[in-house]
Amino acid sequence: MGIKVLKSGLHSTIQDIGRIGLQALGVGVSGAMDVYAMRMANILVGNNEKEAVMEITWIGPVLEFEQDGVISLFGAEMSPTINRETIQMGCPILVRKGDVLRLGVSKKGCRCYLAIRGGFDVSSVFGSKSTYSLGEFGGFKGRALQEGDTIYWNEVSLMKNLSSNWRLSPKLNHYQNNNVIRFVAGKQYSWFTENSQNVFASQLYTVTLDSNRTGYRLCGEQSLKVENDKELLTEGTVFGTIQIPQNGQPIVLMADRQPTGGYPKIGEVITVDLRVLAQKKPKDMIYFQPVSLKEAHQQLILLEKEIKLVKKIVNQKLEVES
């Protein structure tokens, strides 16, 4: 008994915080694209923040619950309904055996996260439940969910006294409307011509159709160039590394990136804005804005304080309703 996939949607996978510490062995990190939304969804049902969730991309699935449970949805707005009746996002929801959850096409953002109280019951591979589709391991059979799949979860108390008179403020999703992506200078920033540095931090970029969980390919009016055609030996990469290949158009490495890369790095997206980028769809437009490493750290501290406060308030409500 679990969740039966009646329709798969575009691309739904099981993701958690990722496989940390194995890149040196050639194992990618994977994990949720929007870690903030993943954490919030888990907090809403009383899970550990790093617990595995269902990451739903752009076009949502249709899911039938084969037993009672408590779920939450956070992230992209996908007009969710249960048994054809609209439900709220940003709050815990009691679902009953036979209930059918439908998520539509995203109206705002790109990725929505479904958490279930107790967490999904899938095997851990290299210390993570995250799906790595390219390697065909982790998550549910190493792939995106398909029609006919049944996904199980770990049963815990249901919090049967759940009220429906509260939800997290929609303002916590405000970052999805932001088009500014802040970055710190990359290791090879000085390799680029002064004009290219200025262009990178001023021109508008479009997320291309050839963008996915591995990397976002961007297109700008002017190409970027390095001084004296310098070449780079392969180096380690991180989520948010901005590489510039020979065509001069940026590639931002995302959750399923390769462990190493050989293109010069003009910048690194700051941690706080990875969630912003993760919610962009093809044809969305962004700007890059340089910031200092100190400011990047300060923004992360503020975000963590916000999450800690939200968690405290939600836990108080869940204690009353459990």
Image: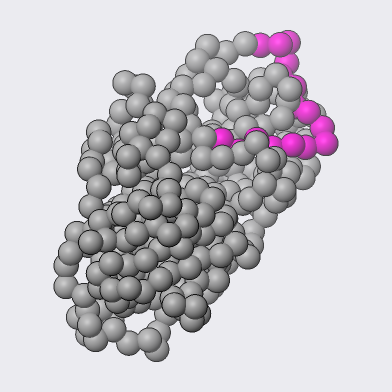
67, 139: nearer the viewer: 67
Position of 228 with respect to 279 (left or right) is: right
Q: Position of residue 26 (x, y in %)?
A: 36, 22
193, 318: nearer the viewer: 318
**Above or below — where is 206 with respect to 276?**
above
225, 32: nearer the viewer: 32
Q: Which residue is at 31% across, 21% downward?
A: 25
**Above or below — where is 186 with respect to 158?**
above
Q: Quadrant of residue 48?
A: bottom left
Q: Position of residue 30 (x, y in %)?
A: 40, 38
Q: How many marks?
A: 0
Q: Position of residue 278 (x, y in %)?
A: 54, 49
Q: Is residue 95 visible?
A: yes
Whether residue 227 appears in magenta in the rendering, the answer is yes
- Give the residue furthest to the right: 221
**Above or below — where is 289 with respect to 74?**
above
Which image quarter holds the N terminus? bottom left
Position of 244 with respect to 66 (left or right) is: right
Q: Which residue is at 43% across, 76% downward?
A: 82
**Above or below — where is 2 with respect to 263?**
below
Q: Which residue is at 74% across, 36% downward?
A: 219
Q: Position of residue 4 (x, y in %)?
A: 34, 59
Position of 142 with respect to 243 (left or right) is: left
Position of 108 with respect to 306 (left or right) is: right
Extent of the magenta region: 215-230
Q: Which residue is at 68% across, 40% downward?
A: 209
